[in-house]
Amino acid sequence: MVPFHAALAVALIFQTWVLEQAKYSKDAISQYYRFIWNLFYAEYIFFPLI
């Protein structure tokens, strides 16, 4: 479980960096928001496997 969450945390940090590099454009913010929802869905997919 820890490696899974660590991988998601690294992905979130990377996406935050991508957002910052895009100068917080409207499109980049939309993609970042969608990515956060995908993380949420990934947690619910992974949860029954614990």
Image (spheres, grey):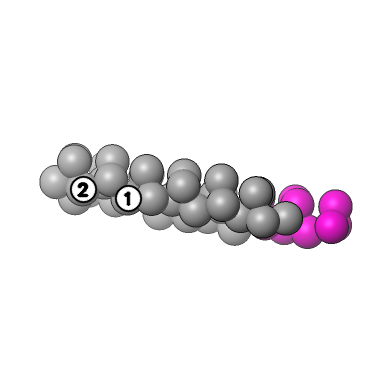
Q: Please report the bounds of the magenta region as a residue range.
A: 42-50
- Residue sitting at x 72%, y 55%: 1
Numbered badge on residue 20: 2
**Residue type, numbered disc 2:** Glu
Amino acid type indicated by mark 1? Thr
Q: Quadrant of the C terminus?
A: bottom right
Q: In the figure, is residue 38 to the left or right of 28?
A: right
- Furthest toward the left, the residue is 23
Residue 16 visible at all: yes
Could you classify mark 2 by the number of other residues whose Cα lies within 10 Å: few (under 14), some (14-19), or many (20 or more)?
few
- Magenta stretch: includes residue 44: yes
- Are the residues at dot 2 and dot 1 in contact (C-beta closer than 8 Å)? yes
Q: Nearer the viewer, residue 26 or 36?
A: 36
Q: Residue 31, relative to residue 33: is it above or below?
A: above
**Dominant SS type (magenta):** helix
**Is 5 in the magenta?**
no
Dot 1: what SS? helix
- At x 47% / y 44%, what residue is drawn? 11
User: Which residue position is annotated with label 1?
Assistant: 16
Q: Residue at x 78, y 59 (%)?
A: 47
Identified at 65% across, 49% down, the residue is 3
Q: Position of residue 25 (x, y in %)?
A: 18, 46
The residues bearing labels 2 and 1 have C-alpha atoms spaced at a distance of 6 Å
Horizontal arrangement in the rendering, residue 9 relative to residue 15 (left or right):
right
Report x, y in % for residue 21: 18, 41
